[in-house]
Amino acid sequence: MASKIRLDRFLAESGYGTRKEVKQIVKKGIVEINGVPVKNPSFKVDPETDNVTVDGEDVLHINNFYIMLNKPKGYITSTKDKELTIMELICDIPRFKSLFPVGRLDKDTTGLLLITNDGELAHRLTHPKWKVPKTYIAIIKGKLSKKEKEKLEIGINLGDFTTKPARVKVLKEGESSEVEIEIKEGKYHQVKRMFENVGHPVLKLRRIAFGPLKLGDLPEGEYRFLTDEEVRKLKKETGLK
C-alpha cells in the first residue's frame, strides 16, 4: 500500500496547479474523496486506493510519465524554442511542462520519440555505456553498393568520431533507395552524416524503434502512454530495476 500524502500535494502532482493554486480549488468545495466533499488541503490521501474527483472528474495521479510520440516533420525536439516544439503535441497531458524528450530528432526527421520525466532512465538510455540501439528507415539518393553497405556496417570515421558497427538492410532500390539502419550511438545528425559519407544524401528519415520500443502503427503527430511491460523492458535494457 502506498503511503498517504496531503491532498494539495496529490492535486499539484496531478497537474492541477501549484500547491497554492490547488489549495484554492479545495476550499471551493469541488474536490471529493470517495464521494465525500473535502475542503481541507492537508487531508491525507492514499494514491492507490482513494478515488479523488475535481468538479466531478476523476483525478489521474501518476508519478512518472512514459510517452511515445510519433514526431511529425517541422517540430523542434526541445521543451522551449522560438519555433514549434514537440511540447505542442503533448500539452493536454497533466504536468506536461515537467516532461522532456529523451535524446532528439532533427526538425525534418519523423518517428519514435520517447518523452518522460524519469531523469535516471533518460540518462541511461542516452549514455554510451548502455549502447541502446536506435533503428531508422532512411530514404537515400541512389543505390547503396555492397562496398558502401559494408563500410556502414564496419564503422565510419566522420572526423570528430568513428561510428560503431551498424546493422544495415536495403529494403528497396532505385533512383532513391529505402534502407533500414540500426545504430547504438546518437550523435548529432549521425545517420545523415553516415550516408553522406558514402555518397548517398538522406532525403527522408524516420525512427521506427528505440531499444525494445517499436513505433508500430501509431499515427504521425499522435502519442500514447507506454505499457507497464514496455517500461519494464526499457529499465531492464539499462540495468534499472
Image (cartoon, rainbow, N blue to C red):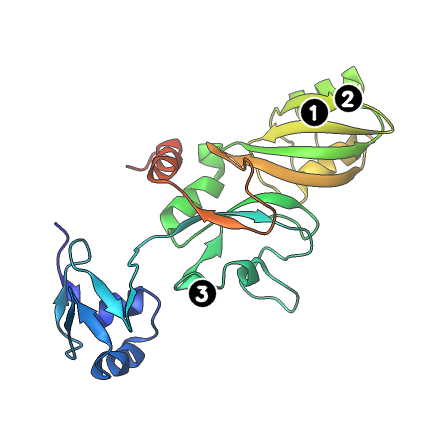
Label 1: few (<14), some (14–19) or many (≥20) C-alpha neighbours in 10 Å = many
Q: Which residue is mark 2?
A: 148
Which percent across, then down, holds residue 241? 28, 37
* Element assignment for label 3: helix
Q: Give the image quarter of residue 150.
A: top right
* Element assignment for label 1: helix
Q: Nearer the viewer, residue 45 or 165?
A: 45
Which percent across, then down, holds residue 206? 65, 39
Between marks 1 and 3 in the image, the one whose residue lies nearer the viewer: 3
Of mark 2 and mark 3, the one earlier in the sequence is 3
Q: Say what amino acid the circle numbered 2 marks.
A: Glu
Contact between marks 1 and 3 (CB within 8 A): the answer is no
Label 3: few (<14), some (14–19) or many (≥20) C-alpha neighbours in 10 Å = few
Q: Say what amino acid the circle numbered 3 marks.
A: Lys
Q: Say what amino acid the circle numbered 1 marks.
A: Leu
Q: Decide if residue 189 is in sight here.
A: yes
Between marks 2 and 3 in the image, the one whose residue lies nearer the viewer: 3
* Element assignment for label 2: helix
Q: Residue at x 68, y 53 (%)?
A: 107
Q: CA distance from mark 1 to mark 3?
A: 39 Å
Residue found at the far top of this picture: 146
Left or right position of 85 against 19: right
Q: Which residue is mark 1?
A: 152
Contact between marks 2 and 1 (CB within 8 A): the answer is yes
Of mark 1 and mark 3, the one earlier in the sequence is 3
Which disc is residue 97 wearing?
3
Q: Residue at x 63, y 57 (%)?
A: 76
Compared with residue 90, is residue 209 higher up or lower down, i.e. above or below?
Answer: above
